[in-house]
Amino acid sequence: MKSGWQTSEFWLTLVANVLAFAVAFGIVPIGDKETVQGAATQIITGVFGLLAGAAVLWKYIEARKTLKVAAMDAAIDDRIDSLDRHASEAYAMIPIDVRKEANSVGMPILTLILLAFQNRDNIAKLIEAIRNWRKPA
């Protein structure tokens, strides 16, 4: 439930009372009271209509953003899972002695996999590349 001052009824009542005081003190002539009151009512109703429309639009945008972010996160998770699966399969195809050599120099798994693909026809070149590998500074 909204606070009292956030409702259109509050503002219509406030305008009506301000208008009554303005008439009582002679600021607004009695003959113009109906015209001013009608105009004020239409203005307040219009403002609250615009605010309500903006609130609906804001909620719609937030809901769409939430859906799109969730879909993107799911797609990214799927891609990461796929890459992990492929990397694990590729790592498993590298001979154990080559993996041990890479581990002894502290070579990251992905670097080893890339080197293994580049030198897949010649294990000796792969082991030599591992021995010559230097950690990036």
Image (cartoon, helix red, strand yellow):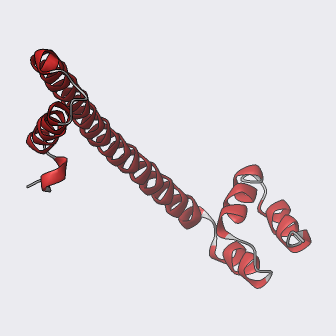
Q: At 25% from the left edge and 33% from the top edge, which residue is drawn?
A: 51
**Residue 8 in the image, given as x and y percentages of width and height:** 13, 39
Most distant residue in the front direction: 26
Measured as percent of width and height from the top left, residue 3 is found at 14, 56
Q: Is residue 131 above or below residue 29?
A: below
Which quarter of the figure has residue 113?
bottom right
Q: Is residue 28 left or right of residue 71?
A: left
Q: Describe residue 21's horizontal placement relative to residue 97 as left or right.
A: left
Residue lying at 76% horizontally and 84% vertically, measured from the top left? 104
Residue appearing at x 65%, y 68% in the figure: 109
Residue 85 higher or lower than 65, as above or below: below
- Residue 9 or 123: which is nearer the viewer? 9
Q: Quadrant of the C terminus?
A: bottom right
Placement of 49 over or under 136, stated as above or below: above
Q: Nearer the viewer, residue 72 or 80?
A: 72
Q: Quadrant of residue 41?
A: top left
Q: Nearer the viewer, residue 126 or 15?
A: 15
Q: Is 51 left or right of 24, judged from the image as shown? A: right
**Figure disc tally:** 0
Q: Position of residue 119 (x, y in %)?
A: 77, 54
Q: Quadrant of the N terminus?
A: bottom left
Q: Residue furthest bottom?
A: 104
* 100 on left or right of 10: right
